[in-house]
Image (cartoon, rainbow, N blue to C red):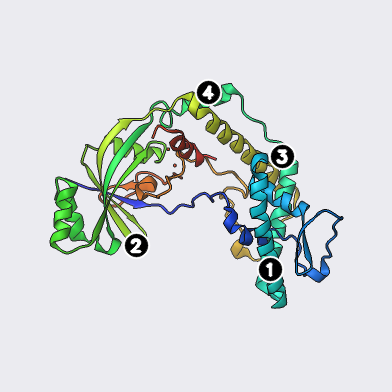
Amino acid sequence: MKTFHLAANQISFPTPRRMLSAAALVLCAATLAGCSKDEAPKESKPGQALASVNGEEITVLQLNEELQRLGVGAQQQQVAGKQVLQALIDRELLESEAAKEKLDRDPKVMQAIERARSLIIAQAYMQKRLGEPVRPSQAEVEDYFNKNPQFFSNRKQFAMNELILSASDLTPEVRAAADNAKSLEEVAVFLDARNIKYGRAQVTRSTADLNPQLSAKLLSMQKGQLFAVKEGDRAMLISIAEVRDAPVTLAIAAPQISQYLMNKKNKELAAAEIQRLRGTAKIAYLNKDYQPDPNAPAGGAPAAAPAAGTPAITADPSATAVATGPAGQSVAPPAETGAATDKSALERGVAGLK
């Protein structure tokens, strides 16, 4: 049985929502000015202070700002406020100790503060320029749903079995054995006979997890067909156990589609604003080595919407693989990847489209 060899593409996962336990470190990045405590006197009115740490007050204004950044709802603010206040106290302690050691004057720290300041100001300008996002109409949502049946009404789900081994153990001999094997179990027997260590896993991916070319490739494979994936220092030998229908209705998909379309519109508006600013600015490259290729896309252009969503919590390389032929020639460009007929699966399916 011939195996198809796949090469995993490196991806960036979406940053998870910040946890309150990590807030002490996250909050440090919110400093806007590269100045020490002595240079930035604090003002507070009676009753505004919630706590005092070695004489430095933590105010209601600071707490409310952090609660807003964390997206805490009104019903949870009382409980969350206590936790966030502890995080603010921790930050104050860390900042105070850092100031004693003059870390706020360290060139790398000052550079990081300046970068954070620049990013925050640039983001504030863009938010003001774009204004409040406009949600797409029901007709726009339905149109996207109807034009992308592979994500929704015609969604398929692949149940796959894996043998996971070190990439260095995926030798030509192992590849040849996989090519000639009739099942994944035959490959396991081959590995056992040569004392090659491996693990087993069962994974599920859908046509919303994979780029369209790879989905089509998997749909064309027979049940039990083997293919290989390399990702970093590990390799996977995978067989398809089952392909089943897993449709998603418009009612379930609508909120995520709406969010995606809104984000897409904002990206387009932001890109247009960048282009406008570039068109009116005088930009000179003093080092010609860094001058962009005139044929390359202009800076700030929005990336094309990926063909699928983000992977599940446990990243499976098959979700980001690129099918290759015997000679290793790529037949499908990598796409960003993310979806069980349950709501969480759908959210993964369209999250990567944002």
Q: Is mark 2 on a helix, strand or loop?
A: loop
Residue 81 vs residue 218, the one in the foreground: 81
Residue 285 visible to an observer of this rendering: no
Mark 2 crowd level (few <14, some 14–19, many ≥20, 10 Å Cα): few
Q: Which circle marks residue 325 in the picture?
A: none
Residue corresponding to mark 1 = 93
- If you read the primary sequence from the N terminus, does the residue marked by circle 4 or circle 3 appear first? 3
Mark 4 crowd level (few <14, some 14–19, many ≥20, 10 Å Cα): some
Residue corresponding to mark 4 = 142
Q: Which circle marks residue 130 in the picture?
A: 3
- If you read the primary sequence from the N terminus, does the residue marked by circle 2 or circle 1 appear first? 1
- If you read the primary sequence from the N terminus, does the residue marked by circle 1 or circle 4 appear first? 1
Asked whether, in this view, residue 230 is left or right of residue 121, the answer is left
Q: Do the residues labelled 2 and 1 touch (CB within 8 Å)?
A: no
Amino acid bearing label 3: Leu
How much space separates mark 4 and mark 3, taking CA atoms? 25 Å
How much space separates mark 2 and mark 1, taking CA atoms? 41 Å
Q: What element carries label 1?
A: helix
Mark 3 crowd level (few <14, some 14–19, many ≥20, 10 Å Cα): some
Q: Quadrant of the N terminus?
A: top left
Q: Are marks 1 and 4 in contact (CB under 8 Å)?
A: no
How much space separates mark 3 and mark 1, taking CA atoms? 38 Å
Mark 1 crowd level (few <14, some 14–19, many ≥20, 10 Å Cα): some
Amino acid bearing label 2: Asp
Amino acid bearing label 1: Leu
Q: Which circle marks residue 233 in the picture?
A: 2
